[in-house]
Image (cartoon, rainbow, N blue to C red):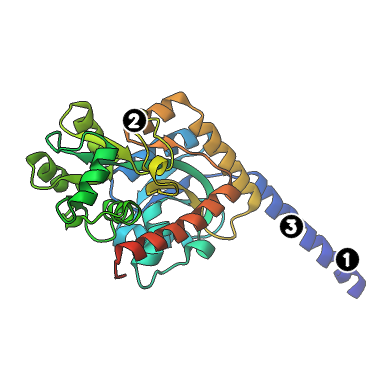
Amino acid sequence: MHAVLSRAIPLVASLALAASAHAQSAWPARSITLVVPFAAGGNNDVSGRIVARKLADLLGQPVIVENKTGAGGTIGSAAVATARPDGYTLGFLSSGPVAAAVSLQKSLPYDPRKDLLPVARVTTSPSVLVVNPVFPAKDLAEFVAYAKQNPGKVNYGTAGPGSSPHLAGALFESMAGATMVAVAYRGGAPALADLMGGQIQAVFNPILEVMPQVRAGKLRALAVTTTKRSSLLPDVPALGERYPGYEVLTWNGVFAPPGTPGDVVAKLNEAVRKVLADPEVVAKLADLGLEVAFSSPAEFGAFVNEQIESFAKLVRIAKVEPN
């Protein structure tokens, strides 16, 4: 009897391992949930749905977008971090809850470095330094000179302390040796309204928010907030050209819960690569002010770590107290 059991136990174990391996190799066998941590209709949501539709075509299973909103995207991100690591719950997460929140919030319900598994970076997006056409500076060099010669007289609008426009402006002040005044608004739209009305002199707003006004001649674009020029505004210089190392950008990508099988992550990464090679997808993302920036899981993980450190530096420069 003992001999029979001793032979049966390894057999059962090997069958279980074989079943597990088959389950992984058969992924996906059912619908996948893609968590978007922001409200429907926003930039992150729309871009996530563009990617989800193409992923569904490639994977042969529905990819259902689920909006889990609140706390600056951290509620949805936490849901991904604690989900079952089987490849059926993923997150379409951005720089805010993954990188900036580490320094802007006193305590997060997750550690992005340990609790979120990078699968593939999808896009990056710069902000743009824009001024009203009546502002005396016609280009970046003149703006720098004016700001340095008139300390405290350039008011730039932000979406509040710690927002991307605020951090971009604070880094500019630090690297240019200029003193400006950050004026907090309840979002980018009211800041733009006051800029066009002449109440403030500049903003460092996301490219999507300012492109229509720039193209219509209602605002003047002086620089993008990245190390290199943007393909979306190729004639506008990058602040990184004048100040090496200057970079403030937003980004998004696909994440999985930690422990997700490596072969599933590899299949997902390859599927995302194919999605981002589709000219139709590239064009739709460009319309949202997003540039395709695909990367491998390892490259994305290294990038996330760099971004966490970068945002920590920006928050210190801007002297923002964590909430």
Q: Marks 3/2: CA distance?
A: 53 Å
Residue in the image at 82% along x and 61% along y: 11
Can residue 171 be seen here? The reply is yes
Q: Report helix, strand or loop for mark 3.
A: helix
Counting residues from the start of the chain, the first of labels 3 and 1 encountered is 1
Q: Which mark is residue 46?
A: none
Disc 3 or disc 1, which is closer to the eye? 3
Identify which residue, 268 or 199, lies in the foreground: 199
Residue at image point 18% right, 26% down: 216
Disc 1 and disc 2: Cα gap in Å? 69 Å
Pointer 3: residues within 10 angstroms few (<14), some, or many (20+)? few
Kindly identify which residue carries mark 1.
Answer: 7
Q: Nearer the viewer, residue 46 or 9?
A: 46
Report the mark closest to the observer, 1 or 2. Answer: 2
| Kind of residue indicated by mark 3 | Leu
Eye-nearest disc, 3 or 2: 2
Under mark 1, the amino acid is: Arg
Q: Secondary structure at mark 1?
A: helix
Please name the amino acid that badge 2 sits on.
Answer: Leu
Give the residue at the far bottom of this rendering: 2
Residue that numbered label 2 is attached to: 233
> Badge 3 is on which residue?
17
